[in-house]
Image (cartoon, rainbow, N blue to C red):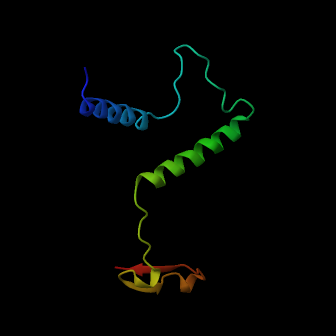
């Protein structure tokens, strides 16, 4: 005969197994749903791109953005004599 303590332990273990179960149970050999059946190849590629970006951003912290005015070095106009409007920073 099980003691009350053993019954409580079994109940906690069952609750833990239930809480750790992810997704749904699928029978082996059952057909998979066609998630992208009605999409064109371009739409599928766009969906994969969005999913990849979400996964990448979720997997690492966002980089800190340093304002350009705080970058090291001296800012100067290297193409002023040629009419170029690009600014370059010498380190």
Q: Picture coordinates of residue 20 (x, y %)?
A: 40, 36
Q: Picture coordinates of residue 91 (x, y %)?
A: 34, 79
Q: Is residue 52 above or below residue 67?
A: above
Quarter of the N terminus within the rendering: top left
Residue at 55% across / 86% down in the picture?
A: 81
As rendered, which of 21 and 38 lies closer to the eye?
A: 21
As rendered, which of 49 and 34 lies closer to the eye?
A: 34
Residue at 61% across / 22% down in the picture?
A: 32
- How many discs appear? 0
**Residue furthest toward the top?**
29
Residue 54 horizontal side relative to residue 64, left or right: right
Q: Picture coordinates of residue 58 (x, y %)?
A: 46, 53
As rendered, which of 69 and 54 lies closer to the eye?
A: 54
Residue at 66% across / 27% down in the picture?
A: 34
Q: Is residue 4 above or below residue 55?
A: above
Residue 65 horizontal side relative to residue 79, left or right: left
Residue 73 horizontal side relative to residue 81, left or right: left
The quadrant in which residue 43 appears is top right
Q: Picture coordinates of residue 35 (x, y %)?
A: 66, 32
Residue 22 horizontal side relative to residue 10, left or right: right
Residue at 63% across / 40% down in the picture?
A: 45
The quadrant in which residue 51 appears is top right
């Amino acid at each position: 005969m099980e003691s009350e303590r053993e019954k409580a332990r079994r109940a906690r273990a069952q609750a833990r197994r239930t809480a750790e179960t992810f997704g749904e149970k699928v029978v082996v050999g059952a057909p998979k749903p066609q998630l992208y059946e009605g999409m064109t190849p371009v739409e599928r590629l766009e969906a994969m791109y969005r999913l990849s970006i979400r996964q990448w951003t979720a997997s690492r912290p966002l980089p800190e953005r340093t304002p350009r005015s705080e970058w090291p070095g001296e800012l100067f106009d290297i193409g002023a004599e040629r009419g170029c409007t690009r600014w370059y920073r010498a380190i």
